[in-house]
Image (cartoon, grey):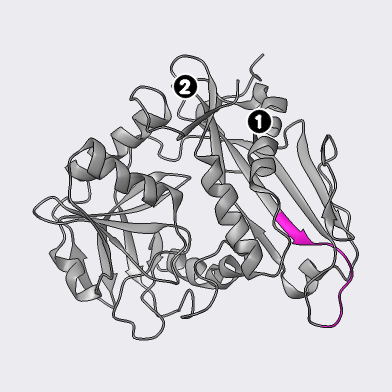
Amino acid sequence: MSKNIDWSNIGFGYMETDKRFVSNYKDGAWDQGALVSDATVTISECACVLQYAQTCFEGLKAYTTEDGHIVCFRPDLNASRMSDTCKRLEMPVFPEDRFVQAVADVVKANADYVPPFGSGATLYIRPYMFGSNAVIGVKPADEYQFRIFTTPVGPYFKGGAKPIVIRVSDFDRAAPHGTGHIKAGLNYAMSLHAIVDAHNQGYAENMYLDAATHTKVEETGGANFIFITKDGKLVTPKSDSILPSITRRSLMVVAEKYLGMTVEHREVYFDEVKDFAECGLCGTAAVISPVGKIDDHGKEICFPSGMDDMGPVTKKLYDTLTGIQMGKIEAPEGWIHVIQ
């Protein structure tokens, strides 16, 4: 039975659900893990995560399709991205098949919190891992905890996707050869001051340029960029310090295979941005947030798509991808993981 929740008014916040998955790594091996009711984490005051930020996470969603199934979108890609992250942070990889199974188990255990089809709400799934034993010298932990919790979240766009205004940031998000390409908690800690400052100045987000030259577009604090050229191509920035967004990679397939568009994944110079017809930020939460305007230190770049609505090509991409996710449009093989 679905919980009695006002799905359209829950916002994007944390609401405790019934069960979460917990597995511990000790003496070189993961235990079998279990679904537990207790939402509290108990660790040493000297735990590696608290001293040296050895932690990473993923984010994905479960939702109800038009035919009433509960599904997840491409959880295998979250599993492999977390595996890449763990290797970079000297953390033990939680096996990818077990990751996907644990996601399914947690969603099934919290099925009553999966919003109904058409509500615009979803069940957000947060897998994460951290170094749990006491570490005082700077080194990786010996023991780790892998957990997954879920929380229902409301529609990202209330009353339609209104284009946002962003600014070119003077802060750097990630260094060349750094950790920008993985989903480490420390990347997000570094972006907090920049996003608070942006919000205080009236902007929705930051556009980060490459740290080495400040000439190339990278991403925002939590989303990849997509651009549409005036002749209808999809262009996405390429860099070793951009997080490989699962939504962005999916949109590239949608553009090429479903909409017949030319797709370019390449370095994008900031000088080019003024010549694009449309701009958007893509990620798990919103799928695509349209950008209407970019403020470059007082100089404004206004996209022809304007400040009223999503641009026409961006809208087509958004409608096609969400149609695939919701079961209205046939998905490429392996994209939709049916849970029940």
**Residue 22 sits in quarter:** top right
Q: Which mark is residue 38?
A: none
Q: Residue at x 32, y 71 (%)?
A: 217
**Residue 239 sits in quarter:** bottom left
Q: Residue at x 72, y 65 (%)?
A: 91
Per the picture, the main secondary structure of the magenta-coloured stretch is: loop
Is residue 226 highlighted in magenta? no
Q: Is residue 71 visible?
A: yes
Q: How many marks?
A: 2
Task: Indicate the secondary structure of the residue bearing disc 2.
Answer: loop
Q: Position of residue 68 (x, y in %)?
A: 51, 15
The answer to whether the residues at label 1 and label 2 have Cβ atoms under 8 Å apart is: no
Q: CA distance from mark 1 to mark 2?
A: 14 Å
Query: Mark 1 highlights which residue?
Result: 107
Q: Position of residue 118 (x, y in %)?
A: 43, 21
Q: Which mark is residue 65?
A: 2
Q: Which one is nearer the viewer's eye here, 96 or 150? A: 96
